[in-house]
Amino acid sequence: MTQLASAMKACTKSNSATPEDLIAEGCFISELSNSADDSDVSIARARLEPGKTTRWHYLRGTGERYVILEGAGLAEIDDLKPHHVSAGDVVLIPPDAHQRITNTGSSDLVFLAICSPRFTEAVYVDSED
């Protein structure tokens, strides 16, 4: 078995009472797993209301993946052509890539935001003009 350089210990985490917070970026976030005892990755559930767009931003030194669970949207990353996304799609966002997502549907856009290494406030940079 390979030894990993992580502080992760075997456990389960109950998220039945995880609060959902409206963040300055413009979406609602529920942190499902984000702690120093698992510094390799963080997982948050994001919810964006119909017609809303998150602020342009990037994560310094942190890669992110969006796993779309419900709804439809338009993902924008750096200079790439915007891509329509829906349930089952995965959006790969390299570290330091400017990004935003728009809910183009009539119901909430719900996705997992998986960051590696784990998300901290120190890596978030708002790049809205």
Image: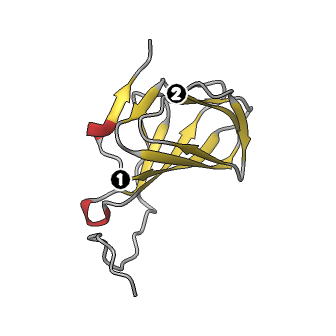
Q: Which mark is residue 48?
A: none
Left or right, 48 with reference to 35: right
Query: Left of 94 or right of it: where is 40?
Result: left
Give the residue displayed 59% in from the left and 24% down from the top. 79
Which numbered disc, 1 or 2, marks the residue that appears first in the sequence? 2
Which three-letter amino acid code belongs to the residue tagged 2? Thr
| Residue pictured at 35% horizontal, 53% vertical | 118
**Which labelled disc corresponds to residue 54?**
2
Residue at 54%, 27% in the rendered image: 78
Q: Is residue 117 left or right of residue 110?
A: left
- Graded by Cα atoms within 10 Å as few (under 14), some (14 to 19) or many (20 or more), the crowding at tag 2 reads some
Name the residue beneath numbered marker 1: 118
Question: Where's residue 9, x and y in %?
Answer: 31, 77
Mark 1 and mark 2: span between their CA atoms? 20 Å
Q: Quadrant of the C terminus?
A: top left
Instruction: State the image coordinates of residue 81 (x, y, percent, origin top left).
Output: 68, 27
Query: Does 38 sit above or below residue 128?
Result: below
SS at mark 1?
loop
Quarter holding residue 7:
bottom left
